[in-house]
Amino acid sequence: MNRCSGFVVDGHARVALALARGEATVPVLYVDLDPAEEALVLATLDPIGAMAGRDDEKLRTLLAGLPYGVDRALSAGPTIHWYLATVGTRPDRRREGLASLVIRAGLAACDRAGLPAAVETSNEANCRLYERLGFQNAGDRIAPDGALRVWVLVRPVQG
């Protein structure tokens, strides 16, 4: 846990497991990182991600075949951005503003880094939450079988 920002920089799986088990506490090691150090840690801490390579030509070809999505919504092509992957609130704690609080903290980091943010949701009600947080609806897509609709929202850098 970074004392300076209040963000968890490692141990997300340990926190999720503790919550799933109903544990009252999670052991935490505190560090003091400035924003640049925290960004470096977050960018390099994932050992599996560190092994991954990137082929820009293949990525452009793949994205060009999609009708639209996060990368198309952000710009004419792929761009560096923060992606909001998963946010959830226990049913007994909903409507308390907890999800907004967590998302706002992440968006503040996006703004400090000078990067836009993107999110996809299959729940239309979530679009209103994201729009209140500065995201703009960039479109939707429907699965080929018609069973699932996904909205793409993007948030330009604020500040």
Image (cartoon, grey):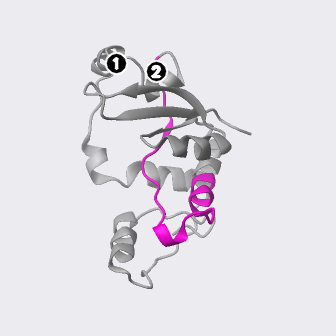
| Label 2–label 1 contact, CB within 8 A | yes
Amino acid type of the residue tagged 1 in the rendering: Leu
- Image point (53%, 25%), residue name: 74
Q: Is residue 49 left or right of residue 101?
A: left
Q: Is 41 or 98 nearer to us in this picture?
A: 98
User: If you read the primary sequence from the N terminus, does the residue marked by circle 2 or circle 1 appear first?
Assistant: 1
Q: Is residue 157 above or below residue 30?
A: above
Q: Secondary structure at mark 1?
A: loop
Give the residue at x 49% y 64%.
8
Q: As displayed, is residue 90 above or below residue 76?
A: below
Task: Where is residue 150? Give x, y as percent.
Answer: 41, 34
What quarter of the picture does the C terminus occupy? top right
Residue at image coords 26%, 49%: 48
Q: Which residue is mark 2?
A: 72
Q: Quadrant of residue 67?
A: top left
At label 1, counting other C-alpha atoms closer than 10 Å, the crowd grade (few under 14, some 14-19, many 20 or more) is few
In this figure, which residue is indicated by the disc labeled 1?
A: 66
Q: Position of residue 9 (x, y in %)?
A: 47, 62
What range of the chain is rendered magenta?
Answer: 77-104
Local secondary structure at mark 2 = helix
**Is residue 147 left or right of 12 when viewed as pictured?**
left
Q: Which residue ends up furthest to the front in the rendered image?
A: 146
